[in-house]
Image (tube, rainbow, N blue to C red):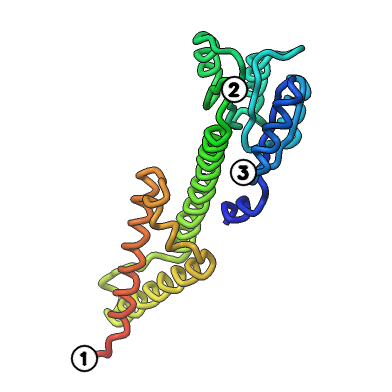
């Protein structure tokens, strides 16, 4: 599961600000919070670092030489590599128009200097955690889709059981038993191959879309039905 693996990697926060004192302060705050700080003093340098390091979050100033913060934000959102990275504007600009523009450009937050250290760290934690959860949901959605597709392929790979008056009842029953055994074996293989299947079919608890949660419930019903049919097939003949 990638979520657990990601948590072992120290998340990166890119700071783009032309003030060196701000960099020193933010680096100390981020290090205390368990983050790795990547720094850029100019907007152009920040764009290059964002594409190269793919940080979990960007802290961006507005007034900088060269590209200002709003221009940097436009470039970030225009690139598929950086468009989904959450951005917090951290600036001395206190105009309402700047807050509105930051929001319109896609920033997740806007904080003014001077700022309260713990408040900034709390917000960073919140946005990084939300982004990690979003990636985990996408990962599980992909896993669940693959499970469903593989189950469908396996269950439809053999011939359907045909019921015909020309076929003796014993043969039809035996073919039905074989089909039940096949379904039971397929489900056993899936559970063995996908050990987190139990978590996947409870997707509604992980924030999955409703249709995938319903698919998980359907898979549970199919599994239970297969087990009941398999038990019936083992009954001794009367």
Work out whether mark 2 precedes mark 1 in sequence or the reverse, and give the earlier one: 2
Q: Which residue is label 3 attached to?
A: 33
Find residue 127 and report its horizontal and vertical position in percent: 53, 36
Q: CA distance from mark 3 to mark 2?
A: 19 Å
Q: Which residue is label 1 attached to?
A: 238
User: Can you tell which mark lies on residue 114?
Assistant: 2
What's the residue at 37%, 50% (across, down)?
204
Find residue 24 and report its horizontal and vertical position in percent: 73, 31
Left or right side of 170 for 147: right
Name above or below for residue 135 compared with residue 41.
below
Question: Is the residue marked by circle 3 packed among few (<14), some (14-19), or many (20+) residues within 10 Å?
Answer: some
Along the line of sight, the residue nearer the viewer: 64 or 167: 64
Q: CA distance from mark 2 to mark 1?
A: 85 Å
Of circles 3 and 1, the one toward us is 3
Disc 1, SS: loop
Q: CA distance from mark 3 to mark 1?
A: 70 Å
């Amino acid at each position: 599961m990638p979520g657990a693996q990601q948590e072992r990697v120290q998340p990166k926060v890119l700071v783009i600000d032309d003030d060196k004192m701000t960099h020193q302060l933010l680096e100390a705050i981020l290090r205390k919070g368990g983050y790795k700080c990547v720094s850029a003093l100019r907007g152009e340098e920040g764009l290059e670092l964002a594409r190269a390091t793919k940080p979990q979050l960007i802290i961006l100033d507005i007034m900088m030489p060269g590209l200002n913060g709003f221009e940097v934000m436009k470039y970030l959102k225009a690139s598929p590599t950086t468009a989904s990275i959450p951005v917090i504007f951290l600036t001395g600009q206190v105009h309402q128009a700047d807050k509105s523009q930051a929001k319109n450009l896609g920033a997740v937050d806007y904080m003014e200097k001077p700022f309260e250290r713990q408040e900034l760290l709390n917000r960073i934690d919140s946005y990084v955690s939300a982004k990690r959860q979003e990636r985990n949901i996408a990962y599980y959605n992909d896993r669940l889709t693959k499970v469903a597709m593989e189950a469908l392929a396996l269950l439809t790979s053999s011939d359907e059981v045909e019921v015909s008056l020309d076929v003796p009842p014993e043969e039809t029953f035996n073919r039905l038993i074989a089909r039940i055994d096949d379904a039971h074996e397929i489900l056993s293989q899936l559970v063995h191959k996908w050990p987190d299947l139990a978590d996947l079919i409870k997707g509604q608890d992980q924030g999955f879309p409703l249709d995938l949660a319903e698919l998980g419930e359907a898979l549970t019903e199919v599994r239970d039905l297969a087990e009941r049919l398999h038990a019936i097939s083992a009954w001794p003949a009367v």
